[in-house]
Amino acid sequence: MLRYKGFLMVLIAAVLWGLSGTVAQHLFHNAGFQHGWLVMVRLVISGVLLLSVISFSSAQESVWRVWKSSDRWQLVIFGLAGMLGVQYTYFAAIEAGNAATATLLQYLGPVLLTCYIALRLLRMPSGLELAAVSLSLLGTFFLVTGGNPGSLTISQKALFWGLLSAACLAFYTLYPTRLLKRWGAAVTVGWGMVIGGVGLGLIVPPWQVDGQQWNWESFLFVLFVILFGTLVPFYLYLASLSYIRPGETALLASAEPLTAAVAAVLWLDVPFGPFEWIGSICIMGTVVVLSRQKEQKEGNVTVTADSMEEAKSRG
């Protein structure tokens, strides 16, 4: 029974992550919001709330101790290049295209990470890894061309930001392993959000709201992105690990891009033809393939489809 509770927690978290991207698309395309402003506000508020929860639930000095260690500079790099990088590129891809395509393109991150580790270790990828790479390339082709090699179904800008978000996710997954081991996910993520949000706030001030259509609907949608697109799924994912193994979350990860695709089609009327759905299935299939790949370890780094879901729990 407890295992089913853990499965349900992860599934709800994945669905909320998928819905938050679609809600962000509505804010960008229909309410005049800019992705930079939404990312900045989301990171700062979520980070402050997360660190506040940690302070109340444990010794307050545990939140600040990281700044007295040599890891503080690695934490700054993670906050700016990792946390901010993956959030900014993902939301930029949504603004330039749609939530479904942006989420699916970001799911190429584990494949890029697998290729990077293979090059780093100077070894040939295994059969399952080659299958995952081939499946992801085929899925990307169908997703961005609709089956027609001579045209793109999304803008070049959306494709650029989507592929860059996958690369940022690979870095985001690989880089903070030492921080996570020494300080835990909550402290690392909380400070990463605050650092990334404050850093972006120096370029995109929070008071720059020109063109934004503020009403009760947009206010609730922004609140949804902050709370139900970040804090609540983050908590559900971490809590689920008390009932199920991290590896068991890999197959449930496909609920996120599937939710984003279905919500974008049904709610926002995003055109999604047969080839786009085939491409989506291929990309989501890479999660299944990589979840069957034996863990490839380099030091303390585990490269499987689980790293994707672990990364999502960190942002």
Image (cartoon, rainbow, N blue to C red):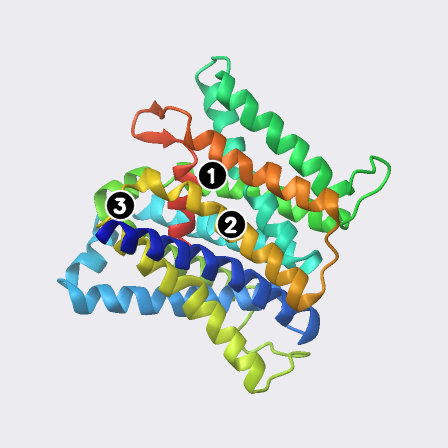
Query: Could you say where residue 307 lies in the image, as x and y percent from the top left?
Result: 40, 38
Q: Residue at x 51, y 17 (%)?
A: 127
Asked if the residue at tag 1 contacts the one at tag 2, i.e. Cβ–Cβ closer than 8 Å, the answer is yes
Q: Which mark is residue 171?
A: 1
The amino acid on which the numbered mark 2 sits, given as a three-letter code, is Val
Residue drawn at 61 percent across, 44 percent down: 105
Q: CA distance from mark 3 to mark 2?
A: 27 Å
For residue 111, the mark is none
Q: Nearer the viewer, residue 288 or 117?
A: 288
| Residue located 68% across and 67% down the image | 268
Disc on the earlier residue, 3 or 1:
1
Amino acid at dot 3? Ile
Q: Can the viewer see residue 223? A: yes
Instruction: Compute the Cα span from label 3 to label 1.
Output: 26 Å
| Residue 182, image quadrant | top left
Q: Which residue is mark 3?
A: 244
Mark carried by residue 86: 2
